[in-house]
Image: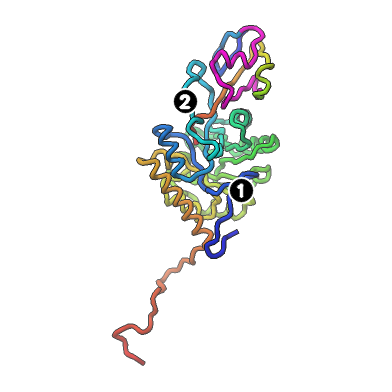
Amino acid sequence: MNATINGERRELPDGATVAHLLNELNLEKNGIAVAVNERVIRGANFDEHRLQEGDVIEIIRAVAGG
Amino acid sequence: MAPVNGAADAPLKIGKHEFKSRLVVGSGKYSSFDVMQRAHEASGTELVTVAIRRIHLDDASGKTLLDFIDRSRYKILPNTAGCTTAKDAVLTAQLAREALGTDLIKLEVIGDPETLYPDTAETIVAARELVKDGFTVLPYIIDDPTACKRLEEVGCAAVMPLGAPIGSGLGICNPYSLTIIKQRSNVPVIIDAGVGTASDAAIAMELGADAVLMNTGIALAKDAIMMARAMRLAVEAGRLAYLAGRMQKRLYASASSPMSDLIGTTAK
């Protein structure tokens, strides 16, 4: 299936969860947050939240700023 | 309340959070994370702002900002910098809370890219929503007493009027409006943006500001670490001068030494 991650179209395995996605991107859970279709997914739900075709996913972290 | 005869100042309270330091500093524009870390230390701050941005998907490794901020020592104040709508600011705040485990948010909704002045209407809409969602909201706002009052009314834990445009270093451009804001505010007033050097920070505090937030003024000094210490001292000096209560200004001189018993005068 296709999803948009941080503005980029990406191919994901069917049935992938948020946890699968983070694993594939080599991302630690710590210090990041994920929104799917403009809703924040709690870290505790990363394992069970399945991604759907066409999902718009944002993955963020803190960066330097004022 | 003002301390009496040199008694210690009360802590700064923002919602449920308490701070001994009245200087809030940013993490942006430093020449390196190492310099930033040492500047934070020199500033004596207990609250550091960070921005929230997308992760680069193909380069997510390596050290990140949070490796250089000791969270046992500093609380983090994530911002919604760059957002131009209430909707984006609210989602950014919610993501920040999830990523950083804090209810604190510096709400920033920009209305114009050149001046970086806030969009007051969108800021108030976002503030209302974030307060309802349980955030401790610190909004960056124009130095307008009415806008600050509206933000207080929707439940913001502090208001953060600008001293001058973000990153301009122009200092405290309108001390009169900031004085009015402070006089009318029931929540802490933090002067956010515009501070270019130590005297600007002292002026802000002498006006009665509860704290000052700055980033560029420290980060872009030739010696950021030394300027961080200068800002710490200026904020403390300005705060003490405010609490001590300055003398009235007068047009003519008033001698500090006795005018009687001078040599060369005729005894009566």
Nearest to N terminus: mark 2 or mark 1: 1
Residue A19 lies in magenta, yes or no? yes
* Chain where mark 2 sits: B
Residue A47 position, x and y percent, is 66, 17
Residue at the limit of the structure toward the front, as seen here: B72
Q: Residue tagged by mark 1?
A: B13
Kindly report which numbered mark, 2 or 1, lies closer to the viewer in this rendering: 2
What colour scheme governs how the chains and residues are painted in the rendered image of this protein? rainbow
Residue B9 position, x and y percent, is 56, 56
Q: CA distance from mark 2 to mark 1?
A: 33 Å
Q: What stretch of residues is rendered in magenta?
A: A13-41
Question: Does the residue at mark 2 contact the one at mark 1 (Cβ under 8 Å)?
Answer: no
Who's the residue at 63% across and 49% down the image? B187
Q: Residue tagged by mark 2?
A: B63
Q: How many marks?
A: 2
| Residue A62 in sight | yes
Locate residue B122: give its quadrant.
top right
Residues flagged by tags 2 and 1 on a common chain = yes
**Secondary structure found at label 2:** loop
Amino acid marked by disc 1: Lys
Q: Residues within 10 Å of mark 2 (few under 14, many from 20)?
A: few
Locate residue A39: give its quadrant.
top right
Residue at the limit of the structure toward the left, as seen here: B264
Q: Quadrant of the N terminus of chain A?
A: top right
